Amino acid sequence: MNSPLLKLFTHPSDAWIEIRRAEEDHPQQYLPRLLVLALIPALCLFVGTTTFGWSLAGDERVRLSMGSAAQLSGLLYATTVVGVMLMGVMIRWMSRGFDAQPSLNQCIGFAAYCATPWFFAGVIGLVPIRWLALIVLVAASAYATVLLYGGLQTFLRLRKEQAMLFATCVWGVGLLLLVTILVSMILFWTHGLMPEYVRPASLG
């Protein structure tokens, strides 16, 4: 698992070939790996919001109480896992229109691999710099798109023309799902859980 994950960032084409070959030789169980990877942004956000604080307006930085940070991190973790699994369900459903018959487990695995840049970009949750976080998240989104378009043909063994069309459909559905889940998470956390802020954040 570690080697293909690293190669996704250095030699993505080779990584997808290795992932597909490993899947054919020994069918993989992707859910445990997804559960581990999704911990990265959740834990980093917990540490960042309780230790360093984040700026909500101007130069003022505020921290979250331990309870509110735990709620936020738990909610982020749950929505990340559920979001990737739902994306896998959608890929499986859309595959019926193409010459591919992947299992649901394979589709969840593919979605998890494509989301790998976002998982590692979650480390930015430690750093209370908004512009840096924006740059990192945009870069992660761009590379996730590269993985999607570069890996779908290999992983599902589709013709190039089919893979491009399928990847575009997946990208559109993924964007809609991402926005819907994030907005729902923020609204629920803000109005349902009532976060507790600590002002101002102590800098040491």
Image (cartoon, grey):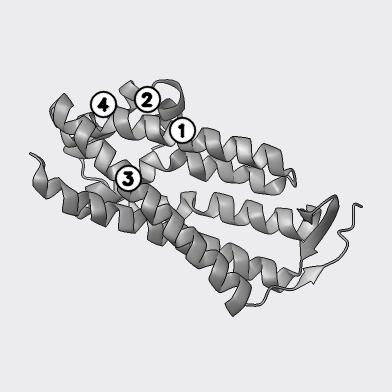
Q: Residue furthest front?
A: 58
- Mark 4 = which residue? 17
Q: Nearer the viewer, mark 2 or mark 1?
A: 1
- Mark 2 = which residue? 12
- Mark 3 = which residue? 172
Relative placement, left or right, of 4 versus 137 is: left
Q: Amino acid at mark 1?
A: Ala
Q: Residue furthest left?
A: 99
- Mark 1 = which residue? 142
Relative placement, left or right, of 8 versus 98 is: right
Q: Which badge, 3 or 2, is on the more N-terminal residue?
A: 2
Q: Amino acid at mark 2?
A: Pro
Relative placement, left or right, of 94 versus 120 is: left
Q: Amino acid at mark 4?
A: Ile
Residue 115 spot, x, y in % from top left: 42, 43
Residue 135 visible somewhere in the drawing: yes
Residue 55 spot, x, y in % from top left: 78, 53
